[in-house]
Amino acid sequence: MRTLRHLIGALVLIGALLVGGLAFVLYDPLSSSKRFLSPSQLITAPAGTVSSLPAGERPVQATDAPAIAALAQRYQPTLVVSGLDRFWPVSVPGLLGARWHGRGTCIYIGGRCRIRDPTVAALSGAGARSEWIQFPAPVDSVQDTFLSAATALRSAVQALRHWPHQLAAEDPFTSAQVYFYYLAKAPRSAYPGAPRGLVSLEYWFYYPLNYFPLVRIPLEALRDPIGSTIGNTDYHQGDLEHVAVLLDPQTMQPLYLWMARHADEGQLYRWHSHSVQWSGEHAAVYAALGSHSSYASCGIQRRSRTYWFINDYVVCIPHQTYGFTYSRTPLVDLAHTSWGCWRGHLGEAGPRLNHGRVAFAPYETDGPFSPLLQQENFRIGCRLPPGVPKPAAPL
């Protein structure tokens, strides 16, 4: 009888620990509060701020037909990114001047550094899938990459020294930009759940580094994302994310908003869905900390692919979050860039990376390919020779 009582007691204890563990992992401190930030809670570009586009980049107003430029700007989203993330959407050419401990950026060809301190002209050729841009900071160091990239983008050195205590003093706005692409007819299955043949207005965000906070203290992750992070994974230089506004090809009116994220976890929203925050015809897109996946709201974003245990966290601390608004963030058309069809990786790649798997994601991965060479744009945005396999979708 005593043994049975001990057994029952042990089972009850194990059950309580499991229930407590589940509650600890799944609890969302924002579950009963508003999941959007108001414009007044965001750090935005001061009036009169002028973004400085790097050499070779021009806004859609200077490159596109007036009708396309007007469409692009009419539906451009506002991108919301935690200031504690350390990265914001920038230009590819703007990062080429990055330096760290005396080292500069280099283009690797045939596994060796061949073009040191490249300009954007070095990316104007076809390139090859085995080539890559290697930025100088270590791929597995968030802080080093932040300092290197921010310096290359001409952020104030004094502001960087005071990060993260004076986020409003840092100026990400003069170097921020969003890439755009007009896809006249979306391929079949490009946007699961949407009708075929829609016009797609794509908005792409290029971040200097991807890092996924794999191990963290869940109850603190939304309040103290840095202090609560125990370990990251899925590091890669260059991180491309995007959303798309899907238009009826006959009326050119918006029908859906598509938010791409990870490999196959994108989500389709009806235009003006109450699940999304809107300012007229402009949606607010919230970037998850580290992975920069696009979401419609703040809080813990449950991922069924990882059984709801390894999730994205959209950190929305008022007055510590940047808003890259549609009215003050320039758009650059990928079809008018010199590097858009360069076939190499836009970040470090190759065998020297530590590809060892950690749980559901590798520790380090290759930098991404150009947006015109992946996902819905594959074989449409650029001419590719026969037999080139489609790159794997991001994790």
Image (tube, helix red, strand yellow):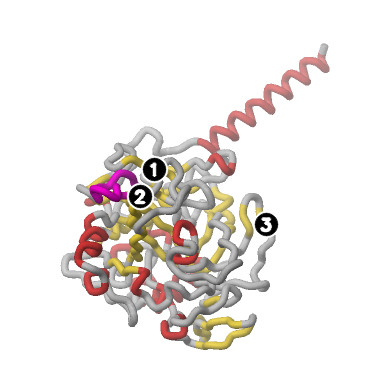
Q: Decide whether residue 250 is among the magenta residues.
A: yes
Answer whether labels 1 and 2 touch (C-beta < 8 Å): yes
Percent coordinates x, y for residue 357 in the rendering: 67, 57
Of 335 and 392, which appears nearest the observer?
A: 335
Left or right: 357, with 105 as reference point? right
Foreground mark, 3 or 1? 1
Q: CA distance from mark 3 to mark 2?
A: 38 Å
Seen in the picture, residue 117 relative to 259 is either above or below; the reply is below
User: Could you say where residue 32 lies in the image, as x and y percent from the top left?
Assistant: 37, 33
Disc 3 or disc 2, which is closer to the eye? 2
In front of the other: 41 or 255: 255
* Residue kind at label 3, given as amino acid type: Arg
Residue depicted at x 52% and y 77%: 133
Residue kind at label 1, given as amino acid type: Pro
Can residue 179 be seen here? yes
How many discs appear?
A: 3
Q: Which mark is residue 198?
A: 2
Q: Residue at x 29, y 47 (%)?
A: 248
Q: Amino acid at mark 2?
A: Leu
Query: Which corner quadrant holds the C terminus?
Result: bottom right
Secondary structure of the residue carrying numbered label 2: loop
Q: Pointer 3: what residue?
A: 357
- Is residue 82 shown above or below 128? above
Determine the residue located farthest toward the top in the rendered image.
Answer: 1
- Please tell me in which quadrant of the rendered image residue 355 appears: bottom right
**142 sits to left or right of 358:** left
Span of residues in magenta: 247-257
> Circle 2: is it few (<14), some (14-19), or many (20+) Cα within 10 Å?
many
User: Residue at label 1?
Assistant: 195
Residue 315, x across and y down, in percent: 40, 50
